[in-house]
Image (cartoon, helix red, strand yellow):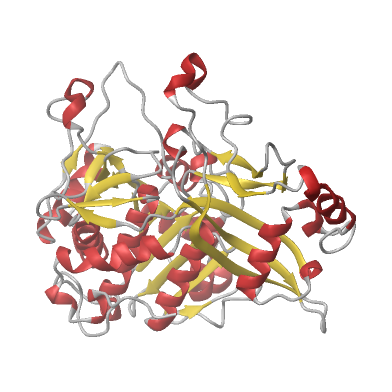
Amino acid sequence: MTLPETTSAIAAASLKPENYTQPFLSFISANPTVFHTVDYFSKQLSSHGFTKLSERDLWTDRLEKGGKYFYDRNGSGLIAFTIGSEYKSGNGVAIIASHIDALSARLKPISAKSTKAGYVQLGIAPYAGGLNQTWIDRDLGIGGRVLVKDEKSGKISTKLVKLDWPIARIPSLAPHFGIAAEGQANKETRMVPIVGLDNTDIGEKKDLQEEGRASILGGAGTFVSTQPARLVKAIAGEMGIQNYSNIVNWELEVFDTQPAQLGGLDKEFIFAGRIDDKLCSFSAIEALLASSSSSSSATGGGSSDDSGIVRMVGLFDDEEVGSLLRQGARSNFLPSTIERICEAFAGDKCGANLLSKTYANSFLISADVTHAVNPNYMDVYLEDHSPRLNVGITVAADNGVSTAILQRIAEKSSSLLQVFQIRNDSRSGGTVGPMLSAMTGIRAIDAGLPQLSMHSIRATTGSLDPGLGVQLFAGFFDYFEEVDAEFT
């Protein structure tokens, strides 16, 4: 896999937001599922000198000052970090946390459905708020991970698959049919995608239908026997699998196949799927790579070689459904990482006192997208709390101290901060920051990039916004230690 060139590989002091536009477009188009995203970031980190760790191993002899590391959990969550050469246990951790799951529609455990009027259909279920009205009449591909058994060794491994051409479609009902075509369609009965045609139930083709029923793909009782036969064949063909029964299980979803692209008269917009929240995740990883560059830092601050802190990015799964899973932010994923780092440099002295000191010296940016102002609905926004595209990171939830710290970092990074506040008569969503801060006591702020059409299958952000995120996040990594010392 060839990774798109990013400015983290160039002299980092020359960072310009526009240099991240095309890499972001390539990234978000090529990685439609959470599994592809983690795989992409893992390869990117490895290519920049990060060492992959395993949770199953002891880290006490693996971690070194000046080292760069990452590991994943479940293939759908990832934590990466660098350790300053002057780090000692009890020092702070500068953390950017985001989530990489997006609203989607996933294949049901048994996704085969009875053919209706010649249409082959696929059983899917909404993930979080996915499968809403914006999914109708879209070109949908299928991708995710497949568990494959090796015939010789008997071992089961996980492999990624992506059928990125239009396979599925949820057809709308023409308005000529009246009231049946109005309102929210029932997600169980009227938002079932069509994936093919099968007219073997009519005329002379009936014999072919009976013959097909007698031959069960993969054999009776196998996983693939519960899935659409033509989908199994398509996935097996894409993966080079000869024996269908070697497909033990899979986790697949449908996704919008339309690539991300620039829009607007001067190409000032990005139109893409899954912006929430692969956008802040991309910027966070790029910022860590830029900040950990051995030649220079992204904003002119100190490099990781002479810092006394840990710089960390946590990308979590399951944020859209509450985060209470092992790869989610409400698990021990992030706290256990910090504890293991502390132990590696303090040994048996890394108890409650030292961990509490570490947390108290740390700071967390909860980086999740927020609402850009929509010019057609100005009345639902507060006039002075209406974030714009291509301006900068938006603070959405804070306290005075956290905002003051981030503002100082923004000043040093030549970045602008915006503010969003929901109206008193409206409601808003949450993100990973409060739960992580409450679990650990780490100071935190919710600050992310703005977008239009949140939770639509297709959303909009600014063409400079990925790079503006990198600029501030890299500044956070470079300047947090210095800025934190200004506060008593």
Residue at 78%, 73% in the rendered image: 243
- The quarter of the picture where residue 304 lies is bottom left
**361 in relation to 158, above or below:** above
Which residue is nearer to you in this view: 235 or 485?
Answer: 235
**456 in relation to 18, above or below:** above
Count the labels in the image: 0
Which residue is nearer to you in this view: 83 or 19?
Answer: 19
**340 in relation to 215, above or below:** below
Left/right of residue 268 with respect to residue 327 in the rendered view? left
Please provide percent x and percent y for residue 454: 35, 38
Residue at 63%, 29% in the rendered image: 189
Left/right of residue 202 with respect to residue 126 in the rendered view? right
Please provide percent x and percent y for residue 432: 44, 45
Q: Is residue 145 visible in this depiction of the protein?
A: yes
Q: Is residue 93 visible in this depiction of the protein?
A: no
Please provide percent x and percent y for residue 400: 22, 38
Residue at 36%, 65% in the rendered image: 27
Please provide percent x and percent y for residue 187: 58, 30
Residue at 24%, 66% in the rendered image: 22
- The quarter of the picture where residue 56 lies is bottom right
Left/right of residue 13 with respect to residue 164 in the rendered view? left
Which residue is nearer to you in this view: 139 or 338?
Answer: 139
